[in-house]
Image (spheres, rainbow, N blue to C red):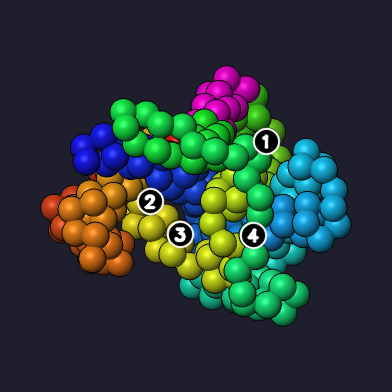
């Protein structure tokens, strides 16, 4: 039982961390809360299904197209509809929620609300410490960690990363330093969409892909970023592990009440916020968020 909790919690935490980091990244830099973030995860999963199963393209081409199309949709949504109202936070919330619902309804109209199946990239199981886990899930975990490490290297070791962090700390000062802040914000939106798309592509084959598959991850992602501290990438990763293990422990300990795992995870978040309202690694707006 302990081995199952450790392994399954690790796999779930990696995927939550990937989604939550993208959500936290775009908030930490542009100060917008994008409720359509996990809808991009859903779109990527459908893109993989459409290009691979409907059009019969190869796996590599299907992955590439699903990723590129999803990132383009995410970036265009930001550029055309969010950028101009970025300072109006409530309006941004409503518009991004509207887009999430529009994306859901579009997929339901195109593919129906019944689940569609995306074949695994690699079939079979790997058994670790007596626990069988789909190889596809191990692949998803590995992909998540590679993507997170890549993001960290980008933000800390490149000029683009320096520009992103500078724009996130103080957009006006960054603009005075010669940084193209609107372009940097657009790139950040693209990076966040990339993380969401990667999540949908690698986890889609382990799930039945349905139009409403974005809602449960959105609940967990919001809990994670609030618990870890809005805008803190480190906090998002750590909180993803905390809530993932809470969810898995509940399911293993009380299988008949597994459906309550998300409610209990949210309860853990609330208790933490009662003690530390800014979250585990939260900072004020004047401090560095990344």
Q: Are marks 4 and 2 in contact (CB under 8 Å)?
A: no
Spatial separation of the CA atoms under disc 4 and disc 2: 30 Å
What secondary structure is marked by label 1?
loop
Q: Are marks 1 and 4 in contact (CB under 8 Å)?
A: no
What secondary structure is marked by label 3?
helix
In the image, 124: left or right of 49?
Answer: left
Mark 1, Cα crowd under 10 Å, few <14 / some 14-19 / many 20+, is some
**Front one among 174 and 283:** 283
Q: Residue at x 61, y 74 (%)?
A: 114
**Front one among 35 and 127:** 127
Which comes sooner in the sequence, label 3 or label 1?
Answer: 1
Magenta residues span 144-158
Q: Which residue is mark 3?
A: 217
Report x, y in % for residue 140. Answer: 53, 39
Numbered label tally: 4
Which comes sooner in the sequence, label 1 or label 4?
Answer: 4
Q: Quadrant of residue 208?
A: bottom right
Report x, y in % for residue 40. Answer: 62, 58
What secondary structure is marked by label 2?
helix
Q: Is residue 165 magenta?
A: no
Which comes sooner in the sequence, label 3 or label 4?
Answer: 4
Q: Which residue is mark 1?
A: 179
Q: Are marks 3 and 2 in contact (CB under 8 Å)?
A: no
In the image, 54: left or right of 183?
Answer: right
Report x, y in % for residue 115. Answer: 60, 69
In the image, 121: left or right of 3?
Answer: right
Q: Which is more foreground, mark 2 or mark 1? A: 2
Q: Which mark is residue 225?
A: 2
- Rendered position, 151 above or below 266: above
Q: Which residue is mark 4?
A: 117
Spatial separation of the CA atoms under disc 3 and disc 2: 12 Å
């Amino acid at each position: 039982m302990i081995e199952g909790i450790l392994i399954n919690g690790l796999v779930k935490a990696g995927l939550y961390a990937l989604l939550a980091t993208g959500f936290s990244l775009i908030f930490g830099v542009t100060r917008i809360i994008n409720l359509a973030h996990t809808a991009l995860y859903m779109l990527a999963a459908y893109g993989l299904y459409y290009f691979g199963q409907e059009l019969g393209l190869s796996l590599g081409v299907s992955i590439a197209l699903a990723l590129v199309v999803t990132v383009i949709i995410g970036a265009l949504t930001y550029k055309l509809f969010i950028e101009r109202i970025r300072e109006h936070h409530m309006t941004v919330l409503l518009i991004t929620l509207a887009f999430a619902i529009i994306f859901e309804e579009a997929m339901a109209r195109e593919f129906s609300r019944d689940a569609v199946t995306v074949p695994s990239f690699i079939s079979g199981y790997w058994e670790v410490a007596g626990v069988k886990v789909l190889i596809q899930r191990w692949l998803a975990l590995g992909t998540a960690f590679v993507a997170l490490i890549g993001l960290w290297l980008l933000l800390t070791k490149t000029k683009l990363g320096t520009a992103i962090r500078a724009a996130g700390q103080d957009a006006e000062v960054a603009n005075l330093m010669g940084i193209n802040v609107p372009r940097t914000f657009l790139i950040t939106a693209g990076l966040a969409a990339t993380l969401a798309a990667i999540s949908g592509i690698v986890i889609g084959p382990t799930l039945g892909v349905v139009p409403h598959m974005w809602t449960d991850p959105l609940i967990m992602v919001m809990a994670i970023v609030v618990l870890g501290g809005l805008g803190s990438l480190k906090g998002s990763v750590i909180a993803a592990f905390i809530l993932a293990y809470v969810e898995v422990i509940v399911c293993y300990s009380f299988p008949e009440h597994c459906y309550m795992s998300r409610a209990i995870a949210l309860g853990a978040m609330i208790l933490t916020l009662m003690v530390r309202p800014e979250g585990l690694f939260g900072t004020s707006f004047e401090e560095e968020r990344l």
